[in-house]
Amino acid sequence: MGTGKARIGILTSGGDCPGLNAVIRGAVKSAVRLEADIVGFRRGFEGLVDPVTYVALDTTNTSGIINRGGTILGSTNQGRFVARSGVDDRLELDPQLLSDVQRTLDQLGIMGLICIGGDGSLSVAQQFHERGIPVVGVPKTIDNDLSATAFSFGFDSAVACATDAMDRLHTTAESHERIMVLEVMGRHTGWIALQAGIAGAASVILIPEIPWTWEHVCQKILERDNAGKRFSLIVVAEGAELPGGGLVTNAAGSGGGQVRLGGIGHVVARQLHERLKRETRVVVLGHLQRGGPPTNFDRALATQFGAHAVRMVLQRQFGQMVAYDPPDVKSVPILDAVHQISRVSPNSSAVVAARTLGVSFGEFPPGQSPLLRSLVLEVSQRRVEPVAAHEPSHADAEAAT
Ligand code: F6P
């Protein structure tokens, strides 16, 4: 390129989500107007090191992408850049890898790198910053589990997808008087389940942040039966712990120290079927929540994030991350976003409001009738066979029964 202008790098890292392309477009349009060049590294951080792969971005090759899902730059989850194990254990990046990144940026004359990522990718960005590599962060994740920003883009789109699924399940559940279980993503937090559960009129919401028991879930369903509503919708977060403890993990395995969650919906459906002797079905929404076009909210937020990130690079606000502090977008230290994940508070107004409406989080509500309680306990003590081998594995299948 060699234009003598400031040059900015940008990359998308980790699991994709709706709105990544809107950030790229917002950054490119802003950079052009602020007379900076911008290059996009392919496949996340991988594009920064051998083989270095990048593309010069302009308003032509980023035109028409504001509403396109995925990322035109591609992304890598984990790969050679892993700075975190599990929820919060720091892993040190290979110093040679960091030197290689610095060399790439020097050779291309890049004054600052915009890293669009979730907690894992921003932990990598934080180590770049500690090493003196000029970086700014943009928070993305459908899980909404990053601290220091009210929302990450992608979350609203995932909730819209899950709510649409709830609406569709509602009508068929009612027709057939069935219990429908919807498993949603969210990793170790219940933000998606909570929002979609409220918006989709769930009877029961099960999330990692609120301990629950089988009998409390059964109680809610029986209460509905007694009220003449012989169908129920349950939304369960993939990271919700089973009553006896333990997460349900996908036997397909895990990568880079992160456990791959998935399958609790099947466990919940089976348990409720056995305990209540009622027809139960399960839907695991999976990656549908990550695909497709971003919602209007996510497009607008992502576009602002892109524009703001470019200004931050030009102002050399390195080690900072774009954050949404309604109604404004501001800058915060990347460290503030990644030092601990953001969880649903069991006493937050959304949870309190849902409880007030009668939504069950799997806890016994105060003031229940003794008759109903004894019925619930009788049902909960029925023997349930262990989960069959073909179903998802989990650490404590026995403890759950
Ligand atoms: O972090 C986003 C997310 O979609 C989580 O909700 C989910 O647990 C995980 O990524 C799935 O990752 P993968 O696409 O690698 O299966």
Image (spheres, helix red, strand yellow):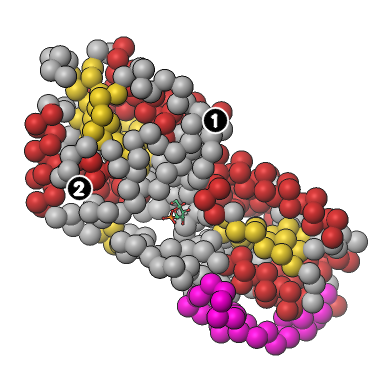
N-term-proximal mark, 1 vs 2: 2
Q: Which residue is mark 1?
A: 297
State which quadrant residue 139 falls in: top left
On whether residue 85 falls in the magenta region, the answer is no
The residues bearing labels 1 and 2 have C-alpha atoms spaced at a distance of 31 Å
- Whether disc 1's CB lies below 8 Å from ligand 1 is answered no
Q: Residue at x 26, y 35 (%)?
A: 41
Report the side of 139 relative to 126 (left or right).
right
What residue appears at the point 50 percent right and 75 percent down from the top-left corner? Answer: 394
Q: Residues within 10 Å of mark 2 (few under 14, many from 20)?
A: many
Q: SS class of the residue under badge 1?
A: helix
Which amino acid type is shown beneath numbered disc 1?
Phe
Residue at left offset 32%, top offset 64%: 257
**How many marks are shown on the rendered structure?**
2
Residue 401 x, y percent position in the rendering: 62, 82
| Circle 1 Cα neighbour tier, 10 Å, few/some/many (<14 / 14–19 / ≥20) | some
In the image, residue 348 lies at what x, y percent?
Answer: 57, 50
Q: Which residues are magenta?
A: 372-401
Q: Nearer the viewer, residue 196 or 254?
A: 254
Q: Does any portion of residue 313 appear in the rendered image?
A: no
Task: Judge whether residue 309 can be spotted in this image.
Answer: yes
Task: State the residue at coordinates (82%, 79%).
Answer: 375
| Left or right of residue 95, residue 288 in this image | right
Q: From the top left corner, tell me how far across and down residue 133 is, in percent.
A: 15, 38
Tell me if 162 is positioned left or right of 247 in this view: right
Amino acid type assigned to the residue bearing label 2 in the image = Gln
237 relative to 137, above or below: below
Q: Where on the image, by quarter, is ligand 1?
A: bottom left
Percent x, y of residue 161: 61, 44
Residue at mark 2: 127
Label 2: state its secondary structure.
Answer: helix
Quarter in which the N terminus is drawn: top left
